[in-house]
Amino acid sequence: MTDIGIGIVGGGYMGKAHSVAMSAVGAVFDTALRPRLEMICGASETSSQRYRDQFGFRRAAADWKALVADPAVEAVVIASPQHTHLDIARAAFALGKPVLCEKPLGASLADAYAMTEAAEAAGVVNMIGFNYIRTPASQFARQLLGEGAIGDVTWFRAEMTEDFFSDPDIEPSWRMQGEANGCMGDLAPHIINAALAMMGPIDSLTARIETVHATRGGVEVTNDDHAQIMCRFENGVMGHIYASRVATGRKMGYAYEITGTNGAIRFDQEDQNALWLYRSDDDPGARGFRKILTGPEHPDYLPFCQGPGHGTGYQDQIIIEAKDFLTAIDSGTPLWPTFRDGLDVSRVVAAARAADAGANWQRLTDF
């Protein structure tokens, strides 16, 4: 096995998750490449030193430029705010270093295009961090669809619903300002990614995007709280996607329902270790949705646990993501989802914004 120096930009929520994942991935998956926590960079020198001590990095960087340029940093994980993604990725690619970037790809569609072009021009491994689609249950759902287990798909519905902003009296915060920090910039990309992963590209869509609470604590809210997208996929299937940060009672409502001519699939991330499957060819007296508990037979489950039904958790999704990133680097071949897949999500977000502004349908080929 060979070690590889990992540099992580950002030490907050996702910076910690990626640090833990890189610490654990070799032991869980016995990867050919073993991460060495080389350097981390936070928002300040003080926070960088704190993250270094807390997460076990060898060194801390005062700024991200020093981290990316350091010869001992051989691969870069971007877990910093969206407006920083473009510059960091460009600098890493210029040095031929692989990049794993948290979603969304950038703060705008222009950023996403620029990052994708830089990645492909450099010809180095690139990956975007859509972790929820990596649960064993959702991987199994994609497998079932690929096998035609529910026949021809006729309908797709998905949602990304949380309630962390449902209280109109919540204290004002940075989440209230700027498109990139609203529901369409923060939550919607995850479930749009799920839709594209399950159903393939979207042909056209229309959308409505709303701010439910115009002010919070006397401060104007300048971004959106929830949105719905009605779409037609390129394969002809109709779909509906809803995202909300004001869905009272929902904590991790990453959920989808897929209807086919010979069955149906249901999933809810709040019960992430189960997939619900209906088969029309069951005996009439036994038809109904069956709950399938994930276990060693399902993708990426066994390395965590030998017991079916014991389950995986949120951090395990990030570990699976780290495994995929290291595998791509080791093979020299990018693995899904790449920056181009992240660009496709950004194109859908841009089309939805245009549809909402013009109250009409948009073709994705225009974005």
Image (spheres, rainbow, N blue to C red):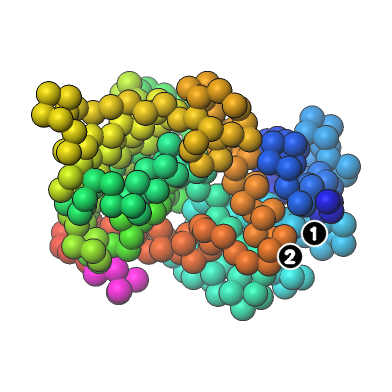
Identity of the residue drawn at 60% across and 42% down: 320
- Work out which residue is located at the far bottom of the displayed protein and give it: 121
Query: Is 10 left or right of 226, judged from the image as shown?
Result: right
Q: Residue 232, image x and y in percent?
A: 20, 60
Tell me the number on the disc at residue 74.
1
Q: Residue 317, image x and y in percent?
A: 56, 38
Snapshot quadrant of residue 325: bottom right
Q: Element under label 1? A: loop
In this rendering, the answer to whether 100 lies above or below 165 is below
Tell me the number on the disc at residue 273.
none
Q: Residue 148, image x and y in percent?
A: 28, 52
Residue nearest the observer in this picture, 171 or 330: 330
Q: Is residue 55 magenta?
A: no
- The stretch in magenta equals 363-367
Q: Residue 363, image x and y in percent?
A: 24, 69
Q: Element under label 2? A: loop
Q: In which quadrant of the rendered image does the C terminus lie?
A: bottom left
Identity of the residue drawn at 44% across and 44% down: 139
Give the mark nearer the N terminus: 1 vs 2.
1
* Chief SS of the magenta region: helix
Residue placed under numbered mark 2 in the picture: 97
The mark total stands at 2
Identity of the residue drawn at 38% across and 48% down: 142
Query: Is 222 left or right of 205, judged from the image as shown?
Result: right
